[in-house]
Image (cartoon, rainbow, N blue to C red):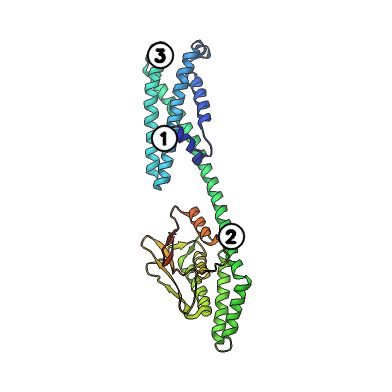
């Protein structure tokens, strides 16, 4: 129970132990007068036993119903059935049964302990009053849960927008660096004399990549086909630069229009592969994108790490991981062997 109370901050934003104790005491004092018709003088006349019985009564109902409430939220989140109507109905029945049993047992004990008499009408008032009290406790914590969930959702939304902005900034920053511009301009200059049409195509592809980055700045997820269209343009530019030294294979089998991924993830992964691996005539770099077996997308390359590593911010892969952590429980996996490096990113369904 105490461990459960400590975990409750995750669901309602704070540890409710002190609040539940206060509610238990207030309920224990007020219950006999509100629901059982006992006068203030009568309550004071039996102050100690009334207070002890009342506190035990209130604490059992408060802490017990809160435990059912929190346990149901934990299982609902774990099983993905938090919003299920059938689950909510079952939980309501659990609250009803628990409260009825507790009020029957402790109500009978209270009546017998105070004056030694048992009245069916008094027990009925105990049960009705307990159910009303339990309903108020549940409504109160449900409201706190929803408010806390909304607050967490807003924070995640802000974090996701910030990470998307960081991702776009990182890509734009890499692409406007002097060496990128130099390589792009140098490639265009080298092909203009012999292949002017290819040079025009190259510039058009470059323009498409920049436009894509700017157009998706507010998107949390992007259809896989849009991302693949961008990566084709991006790889085309790389292949103009590296020629036959860069092999690219794209297998779209099994990919549907409902498959979505976080924006710019493919470009970041391809960029990392080109940046950190040797690309030469003797050791061509091979990059492959295909659907995996478990609704994921595999981006792999043969591993031939450069001996002289270029400076790295380390934000590319961690950025992708962070954005997926906000959107889903499914993880970004890295499969690293002596020969290949593969990143598996989840494909998310959007209806």
The quarter of the displayed image where residue 315 is located: bottom right
Quick check: 207 above or below 142?
Answer: below
Q: Which residue is drawn at 56% across and 53% down?
A: 159
Q: Name the residue under label 3.
A: 113
Return the residue nearer the eye: 181 or 351: 181
Q: Nearer the viewer's eye, disc 2 or disc 1?
A: 2
Instruction: Identify the secondary structure beneath mark 1.
Output: helix
Give x and y (percent) for residue 187. 57, 80
Q: Which of marks 3 and 2 is nearer the N terminus?
A: 3
Marks 3/1 in contact by CB < 8 Å: the verdict is no
Quick check: 40 above or below 138?
Answer: above
Q: How crowded is mark 2: few (under 14 residues within 10 Å), some or many (20 or more)?
A: some
The image quadrant where one finds the N terminus is top left
Q: Residue 166, labelled with which disc?
A: 2
Q: For the residues marked 3 and 1, what is the alpha-carbon distance in whole angstroms?
A: 28 Å
Instruction: Identify the secondary structure beneath mark 2.
Output: helix
Give x and y (percent) for residue 35. 46, 21
Q: Earlier in the sequence, mark 3 or mark 1?
A: 1
Return the residue nearer the eye: 1 or 60: 1
Q: For the residues marked 3 and 2, what is the alpha-carbon distance in whole angstroms?
A: 67 Å
Q: Nearer the viewer's eye, disc 3 or disc 2?
A: 2
Instruction: Identify the secondary structure beneath mark 3.
Output: helix
Give x and y (percent) for residue 347. 43, 61
Q: Earlier in the sequence, mark 2 or mark 1?
A: 1
Q: Mark 1 points at which residue?
A: 68
Marks 3/2 in contact by CB < 8 Å: the verdict is no
The image quadrant where one finds the C terminus is bottom left
Return the residue nearer the eye: 289 or 200: 289
Q: Residue furthest bottom?
A: 194
Return the residue nearer the eye: 6 or 340: 340
């Amino acid at each position: 129970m105490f461990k459960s109370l400590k975990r409750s901050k995750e669901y309602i934003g704070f540890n409710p132990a002190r609040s539940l104790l206060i509610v238990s005491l207030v309920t224990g004092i007020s219950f006999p007068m509100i629901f059982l018709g006992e006068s203030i003088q009568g309550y004071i006349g039996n102050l100690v036993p009334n207070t002890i019985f009342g506190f035990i009564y209130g604490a059992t109902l408060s802490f017990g119903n809160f435990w059912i409430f929190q346990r149901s939220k934990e299982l609902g989140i774990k099983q993905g059935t938090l919003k299920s109507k059938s689950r909510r109905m079952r939980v309501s029945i659990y609250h009803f049964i628990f409260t009825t049993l507790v009020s029957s047992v402790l109500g009978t004990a209270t009546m017998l302990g105070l004056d030694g008499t048992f009245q069916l009408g008094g027990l009925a008032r105990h049960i009705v009053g307990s159910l009303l009290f339990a309903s108020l406790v549940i409504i109160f914590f449900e409201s706190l849960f929803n408010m806390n969930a909304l607050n967490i959702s807003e924070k995640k939304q802000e974090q996701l927008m910030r990470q998307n902005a960081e991702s776009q900034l990182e890509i734009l920053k890499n692409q406007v660096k002097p060496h990128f511009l130099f390589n792009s301009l140098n490639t265009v200059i080298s092909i203009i004399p012999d292949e002017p049409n290819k040079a025009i195509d190259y510039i058009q592809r470059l323009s498409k990549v920049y436009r894509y980055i700017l157009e998706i700045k507010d998107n949390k997820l992007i259809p896989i086909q849009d991302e693949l269209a961008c990566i084709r343009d991006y790889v085309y530019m790389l292949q103009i630069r590296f020629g036959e030294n860069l092999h690219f294979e794209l297998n779209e089998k099994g990919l549907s229009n409902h498959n979505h991924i976080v924006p710019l993830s493919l470009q970041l992964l391809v960029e990392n592969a080109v940046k950190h691996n040797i690309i030469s005539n003797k050791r061509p770099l091979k990059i492959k994108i295909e659907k995996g077996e478990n609704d994921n997308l595999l981006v792999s390359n043969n591993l031939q790490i450069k001996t002289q590593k270029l400076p790295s911010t380390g934000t590319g892969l961690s950025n992708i991981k962070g954005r997926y952590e906000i959107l889903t429980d499914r993880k970004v996996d890295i499969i690293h062997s002596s020969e290949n490096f593969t990143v598996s990113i989840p494909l998310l369904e959007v209806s």
